[in-house]
Amino acid sequence: MAKREFAHPSEMQKHVGEEIGVSDWVEITQERINLFADATGDHQWIHVDVERAKKDMPGGKTIAHGFLTLSLIPMLNSQISHINNVRNGINYGCNKVRFTSPVQAGSRVRARAKLIAADPMDKGGVRLTNQVTIEIEGQERPACVAETMSIVYGT
């Protein structure tokens, strides 16, 4: 899907309630899972022990950390849209996050973003609230549904 372009943060209010777009599919490899485990210190066997997962996990595969899935949102969002004339932007947090289905190693995921609020802030900022759904290819139930917030400041 083509990346959606917006001229300025101030125009985002006009798009509240719209689906902004959908990212490309990204494979969740065992290497990515292992690197996330190393970065966070979370080496729980369900994520990193491939041999044990073959015997003890439904589907016989390791699963990605929920927070790995969540951490993909900025990268996936960058494929979905771009706001021009931004001086800077920051992640502001999440109002709600749910991990609704495990992501097995070797699966592909993508993000679907819907703008649910665009609130003016001081100094030319706009606080954007998006509902981001991380879908798993071939599955009806998503991996994650998160309400994320960021603040962008226009030039």
Image (tube, rainbow, N blue to C red):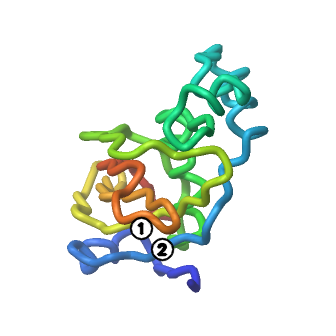
Residue position for label 2: 22
Residue displayed at 36% across by 65% down: 140
Is 92 drawn above or below residue 51 in the view shown? below
Find numbered disc 2 in the image and state the secondary structure of the residue it sits on: strand
Q: Residues within 10 Å of mark 1 (few under 14, many from 20)?
A: many
Q: Residues within 10 Å of mark 2 (few under 14, many from 20)?
A: many
Q: Is residue 129 left or right of residue 58?
A: left
Is 37 drawn above or below residue 124 in the view shown? above
Specify whether residue 15 is in view: yes
Looking at marks 1 and 2 on the same chain, the residue that comes earlier in the sequence is marked by 2
Q: Measure the alpha-carbon separation of dots 1 and 2.
A: 4 Å
Which of the labelled discs sits on residue 112, or is there none?
A: 1
Residue 61 lies in what quarter of the image? top right
Front-most of residues 128 and 123: 128
Of all residues, the one furthest to the right in this rendering is 31
Q: What kind of residue is marked 1?
A: Arg
Quadrant that contains the N terminus:
bottom right
Residue displayed at 54% across by 70% down: 23
Residue 108 locus on image (x, y percent): 60, 60
Residue displayed at 32% across by 76% down: 19
Is there CB contact under 8 Å for labels 1 and 2?
Answer: yes
Residue displayed at 42% across by 67% down: 112
Residue 153 locus on image (x, y percent): 44, 56
Is 19 drawn above or below residue 9 in the view shown? below
Front-most of residues 28 and 88: 28
Residue 34 locus on image (x, y percent): 73, 30
Find numbered disc 1 in the image and state the secondary structure of the residue it sits on: strand
Residue 127 locus on image (x, y percent): 31, 53
Q: Is residue 141 left or right of residue 65?
A: left
